[in-house]
Amino acid sequence: MWSLCKAVIVLILSIVLIKWLKAKDPPPIFNIYRRPNKWYFFKYLIFRLAYALRKYSNSGRSVKQGSAQGYGMKFRATIADLDRLQPLEKNAPLAVDAVFFTGASKEGYYLSVNVARRQNNTVNSFWLLKIPNVGLLVSPKYPDSTLKGEPNAFSTEGMTIEPIEPMKKWKISYDGKMKFQNDKEERMIPVSWELEWTSDLPHFDFDTDLSPATVARAIAREPWSKSYFENFKKRHQTHHEQMGYIKGTIKIEGYGEHDLKLNSMRDHSYARERDWTLMHRYGLHNVTVEDGTKFMVGILSMPVLLSEFEIGYLYSPEGQVHSVESCDLNLYEHGEHGVPPLDYAFTFKAAGKTYLVHCEVLESPDVYIGIDWECRIIERMCRFHVNGKQGWGFAEWQYRRYEGCPNKNK
């Protein structure tokens, strides 16, 4: 009898195994967003183990430039090395060194400034300013962002961003002109400012501080091969972010002086290659809540590496920083064909707590990146409600663009 039972069990298990092995992979949503297949659980466990071993085996070791950094390992040994102007690698036409600042207040002031250094003294740069009872001002060449930069500086056409003290203080200066968005006459108005960005909070290093669970989930969805992991090494980007404050005075001819104190997020990225043609889209939110909570959270889709990647971090009111453990914002359910929602909600989890985020978009200027305008970025100035509390900040959404630059041949 027992022999018969064992035979039946073996038969059932064999049938289950055969069906499992023959199971086809589910098709990607919109032919972009891959879904877990039969190997997902095993790949998840393998990567979690490999990631943990990588971090453990390299803990306490000195960082050597040129070694296999990222994905659990620091790229720079010191804060001073990490947070300074970075040299653009030679023979790397798509190399980048970029700094980005956003700021917002409960009273409705918004500021966004970006300078991305590229080769041949070219920069991708734009600046946007919303002042209550004045309006939304944009940089002179908006919506284009391809400008001429100064050598060895985050500086272009009147805009200069300077590191003063690593992870503590930056200076943002501007003396030039801006125009009102949607002003058909494109009248230029003199604008100037001397702003100071400061922080006493720890930075968040995307090389070492992301949740291992979110990284493993994203990689386990993808088809593995030697070339797939070589792509990771080739396209590694060092990126850190930090919350702080922007303070200073803005002068607008005809509209007086305006004192700013903004809750701010800044980031600094550099890489041998930043190729916007490979980025399908993303939706990122940086938010300050009235109780002192601050966070950045969102989803990124770069199909050549990760078709759906949950990223982010949260600062508690006490200043402790935690990685985002999960986020249920499915990009394919929100504006997949180029029209992102203006009123939407999602949840994310950090430090064991779930946060319900409701986003209401107030302004959404489009900016185009690249010679061919291959990237469209929407800097959405927003009001938020987070677990019933008021918040303010930005929701930056990005799309791959294929139409080309309309002014290229003019």
Image (spheres, rainbow, N blue to C red):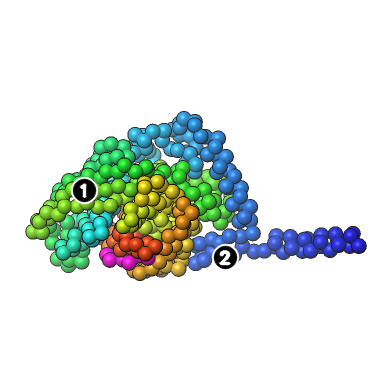
The residue carrying mark 1 is: 247
Q: Which residues are magenta?
A: 357-363
Magenta stretch secondary structure, dominant = strand
Element under disc 2: loop
Which one is in front, 360 or 380?
A: 360
The residue carrying mark 2 is: 27
Q: Which amino acid, mark 1?
A: Lys
Q: Quadrant of the N terminus?
A: bottom right
> At 32% across and 60% down in the image, what residue appears?
391
Which one is in front, 269 or 393?
A: 393
Q: Measure the alpha-carbon separation of dots 2 and 1.
A: 49 Å
> At 19% across and 56% down in the image, what residue appears?
140
Which one is in front, 322 or 336?
A: 322
**Magenta span has 212?**
no
Q: Is residue 31 above or below residue 101?
A: below
**Which of the two discs, 2 and 1, labels the residue nearer the N terminus?**
2
Q: Position of residue 151 (x, y in %)?
A: 25, 39
Element under disc 1: strand
Q: Position of residue 8 (x, y in %)?
A: 84, 63
